[in-house]
Amino acid sequence: MRNNSAEPTQHDQGNHQGNPRVQFILRIAIAAALGGFLFGYDTAVINGAVSAIQSTFNASAVNLGLAVSSALLGSAAGALGAGWLADGIGRRRSMWLAAILFVVSALGSALAPRLLDLVAWRVIGGVAVGFASVLAPAYIAEISPAEMRGRTGSLQQLAIVLGIFIALLSDYLLVLATPDQNPLSNLGPMAAWRWMLISELVPAVIYGAMVLQIPESPRYLVQKGRIEQARVVICKTLGEPTQPVIDRIQLSLGNHEGSSIADLFSR
């Protein structure tokens, strides 16, 4: 008679043991990809407020264009400095700093009394966008095993598009909530267009809270000589023997010593 209570195979045991690790990787990858969501949200949310900003501040076409595009100036600066920041204070702290900048930018933009103030707060939000655009994919790649890296890496792109969609949907719903479907009309204490900008506060706070719960990148830990902490993270994420991974990271770090931004322009 066939024994239906046979012991599970080694392959089944491996799958069973691997599932919690895969779920852990997905959780931290989603947390990091929220930076991509805010990337899309921040760049799109202002679209619903353009005409209201022009009317509120009596802005010329040039000044209005500057206000709308100012986040791009900040994002260029943020992207340029993100790598240096991540190597200096770590990927997790850098993403948390980006979350703080998103929060500050959302509050400042919504409450801006002058167009110049709005531009300044939007530039700060743009810096956060630049940080997120660099930090999220780098971190996801560093904590994902090779067989999952393509799937987890695509979460960033998915999050960007989703952020754009949710931002525009939020703008639409806020305008519908006004008495005359006008972004200049008040919803409680503020005009609807100001609620559009402050709505970014919600995903920014969630992003900051989730980033505090994810581990630091093993590459950064090895770079700073925190080898034992790196071993713990490697076991939880990459699922490989720790020493060969550490050796690869150290070799990679050695190959990049002395490099600078000028190398991008050299042959």
Image: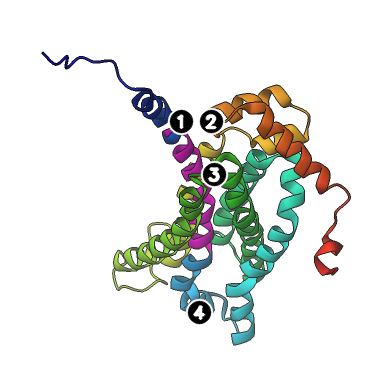
Lateral position of residue 68 relative to residue 265, left or right: left
Q: Is residue 18 magenta?
A: no
Disc 1 and disc 2 in contact, CB within 8 angstroms: yes
Measure how far apart labels 1 and 3 are at the Cα level.
14 Å
Q: Is residue 36 magenta?
A: yes
**Mark 3 — residue?**
146
Q: Earlier in the sequence, mark 1 or mark 2?
A: 1
* Amino acid type of the residue tagged 2 in the rendering: Gly
Disc 4 and disc 2 in contact, CB within 8 angstroms: no
Q: Position of residue 125 (x, y in %)?
A: 61, 59
* Amino acid type of the residue tagged 3 in the rendering: Ala
Judge depth for marks 4 and 1 and give the one in front.
1
Label disc, if present, on residue 55 of the rendered structure: 4
Disc 4 and disc 3 in contact, CB within 8 angstroms: no
Q: Earlier in the sequence, mark 3 or mark 2?
A: 3
Q: Position of residue 230 (x, y in %)?
A: 67, 28
Q: Residue furthest bottom?
A: 61
Measure how far apart labels 4 and 3 are at the Cα level.
52 Å
Lateral position of residue 128 relative to residue 7, left or right: right
Measure how far apart labels 4 and 2 are at the Cα level.
57 Å
Label disc, if present, on residue 21 of the rendered structure: 1
- The residue stretch that appears in magenta: 23-42
Q: What crowding class fits label 1: few (fewer than 14 Cα within 10 Å), some (14-19), or many (20 or more)?
A: some
Judge depth for marks 1 and 2 and give the one in front.
2
Q: What crowding class fits label 2: few (fewer than 14 Cα within 10 Å), some (14-19), or many (20 or more)?
A: some
**Mark 2 — residue?**
239
Residue at (47% x, 75% y) in the render: 52
Q: Position of residue 89 (x, y in %)?
A: 74, 39
